[in-house]
């Protein structure tokens, strides 16, 4: 299996490191991807900032290669699934490639359902990331809000070289519930992205088109 990486920043460089001999090509601003090289790859992992996605999108579609996107801060086209199917490709998109985040997703949905019996609950999400992260709130925080499906305040902090901390609190007059996820090392995102492209390529035979990381996780774990 040969995988190319587009974007060699903080997380992309971790992917390159973890792929080792399975790395096909590593692309960045100084060395942009070409269709010829992408077609020599079995899959692509992409970690570029949101403002760079529109420059990469056409060539990744044209390649028809399975791809895992870890970019946030970009508004994906409404017809992206149709475009991916037309390209005869399989894509997975994630706001966070942590496998543990799928456990969090289920926990948040449980909290949301259970909070219906609480008296005047107040929901808050706070996220902390490194100072070079451009989008705020983070894509993960927005996903937490979507999973919670409640009126929730989101706040953001940018400091140091923090990989990512997300915290949900539910507070009433008499009690407080806190759920927290702390990314201790960026290797967890690289590990999850590599796992995702392995699923796109393996015998599970996922359908052509677009999946979120959560949808993929549920499909694979339910089959197993």
Image (cartoon, rainbow, N blue to C red):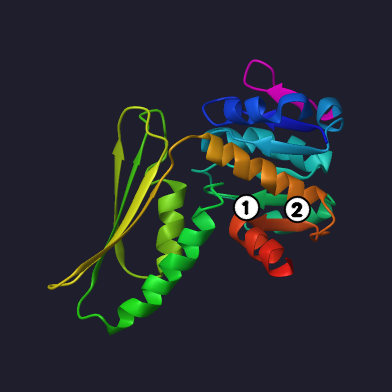
Q: Which residues are magenta?
A: 23-35
Q: Residues within 10 Å of mark 2 (few under 14, many from 20)?
A: some
Q: Image height check: is 210 above or below 127?
A: below
Q: Image height check: is 193 above or below 203?
A: above
210 part of magenta stretch: no
Task: Single out the residue that lies furthest toward the bottom.
Answer: 117
CB within 8 Å, label 2 to label 1: yes
Q: Nearer the viewer, residue 194 or 135?
A: 194
Q: Would you say residue 120 is visible in this rendering?
A: yes
Task: Single out the residue that lies furthest toward the top.
Answer: 30
Q: Residue at x 80, y 61 (%)?
A: 207
Q: Residue at x 33, y 53 (%)?
A: 167
- Give the quarter of the figure containing the C terminus: bottom right
- Give the quarter of the figure containing the N terminus: top right
Q: Residues within 10 Å of mark 1 (few under 14, many from 20)?
A: few
In the visual, does 17 lie left or right of 49?
Answer: right
Residue for badge 1 = 77
Q: Residue at x 68, y 54 (%)?
A: 80
Residue for badge 2 = 83
Looking at the rendered structure, the secondary structure element under dot 1 is loop
């Amino acid at each position: 299996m040969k995988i190319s990486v587009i974007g060699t920043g903080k997380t992309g460089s971790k992917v390159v490191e973890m792929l080792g001999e399975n790395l096909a090509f590593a692309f960045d601003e100084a060395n942009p991807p070409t269709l010829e090289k992408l077609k020599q790859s079995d899959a692509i992992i992409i970690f570029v900032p949101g403002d760079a996605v529109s420059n990469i999108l056409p060539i990744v579609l044209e390649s028809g290669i399975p791809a895992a996107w870890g970019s946030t801060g970009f508004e994906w086209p409404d017809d992206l699934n149709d475009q991916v199917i037309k390209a005869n490709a399989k894509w997975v998109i994630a706001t966070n490639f942590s496998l543990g985040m799928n456990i969090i997703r289920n926990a948040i949905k449980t909290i949301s359902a259970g909070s219906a019996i609480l008296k005047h609950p107040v929901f808050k999400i706070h996220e902390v990331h490194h100072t070079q992260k451009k989008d705020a709130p983070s894509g993960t925080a927005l996903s937490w809000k979507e999973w919670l499906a409640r009126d929730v305040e989101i706040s953001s902090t940018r400091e140091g070289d923090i990989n990512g901390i997300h915290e949900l609190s539910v507070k009433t007059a008499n009690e407080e519930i806190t759920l927290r996820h702390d990314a201790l090392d960026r290797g967890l995102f690289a590990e999850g992205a590599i796992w995702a492209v392995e699923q796109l390529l393996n015998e599970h035979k996922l359908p052509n088109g677009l999946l979120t990381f959560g949808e993929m996780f549920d499909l694979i774990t339910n089959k197993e």
